[in-house]
Image (cartoon, grey):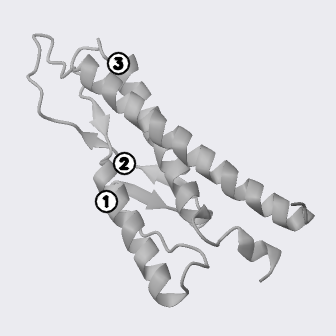
């Protein structure tokens, strides 16, 4: 196995995608919180479930072809796109379910803060797991015990 292939083995590609997705979604949630009092503002969001389904399909496809090694062929969804350089672009849709206020704003501070906290936890967990994986690779390459 070449050193360049080590970055595409095991859980590393899926953890990197989780970090990219949660970072991009955090920007969408922060935008919603910043515009909470803006008249006629409708909060936007990207479905975490759609991302999880697309990631699961990419992992299953990799398992069927190469096992646990090789790059993930992440297809994305209607709201999530990957370009040739591996950059993730989100196309959020309007979240619904709340009653419009008198200023035609569809706000839910508690819901937004809950989304923000949950998304931040996913980001931190993914970063910690990724750091651990790269740490194990560093120990193996440096031949330390």
Which residue corresponds to mark 1? Answer: 78
Q: Residue drawn 11% across and 14% down? A: 101
Place of residue 31 in the rendered image (x, y in percent of width and height, measured from the top left): 41, 26
Circle 1 Cα neighbour tier, 10 Å, few/some/many (<14 / 14–19 / ≥20): few
Question: Compared to 131, does 44 lie above or below?
Answer: above
Q: Quadrant of residue 97?
A: top left
Circle 2 Cα neighbour tier, 10 Å, few/some/many (<14 / 14–19 / ≥20): few
Q: Residue drawn 73% across and 71% down? A: 6
Front-lying residue, 97 or 70: 70
Q: Please tell me which of labels 2 and 3 falls first in the chain.
A: 3
Q: Residue drawn 61% across and 79% down? A: 69
Place of residue 36 in the rendered image (x, y in percent of width and height, measured from the top left): 30, 16
**Side of 51 relative to 42 (left or right):** right
Q: In which quarter of the image is residue 68?
A: bottom right
Q: Is mark 3 on a helix, strand or loop?
A: loop
What's the distance in space between the residues labelled 2 and 3, CA to CA? 18 Å
Place of residue 82 in the rendered image (x, y in percent of width and height, measured from the top left): 49, 61
Of all residues shown, which one is farthest toward the bottom? 65
Q: Residue 91 carries which label?
A: 2
Which residue corresponds to mark 3? Answer: 35
Q: Please tell me which of labels 1 and 3 falls first in the chain.
A: 3
């Amino acid at each position: 196995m070449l050193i360049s292939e080590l970055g595409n083995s095991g859980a590393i590609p899926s953890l990197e995608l989780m970090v990219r997705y949660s970072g991009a979604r955090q920007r969408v949630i922060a935008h919603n919180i910043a515009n909470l009092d803006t008249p006629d503002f409708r909060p936007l969001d990207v479905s975490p479930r759609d991302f999880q389904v697309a990631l699961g399909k990419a992992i299953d496809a990799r398992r069927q072809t190469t096992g646990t090694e090789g790059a993930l062929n992440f297809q994305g969804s209607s709201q999530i796109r990957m370009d040739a350089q591996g950059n993730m672009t989100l196309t959020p849709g309007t979240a619904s379910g709340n009653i419009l206020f008198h200023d035609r704003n569809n706000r839910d501070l508690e819901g937004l803060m809950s989304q923000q906290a949950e998304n931040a936890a996913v980001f931190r967990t993914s970063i910690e797991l990724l750091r651990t994986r790269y740490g194990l690779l560093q120990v193996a390459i440096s031949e330390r015990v």
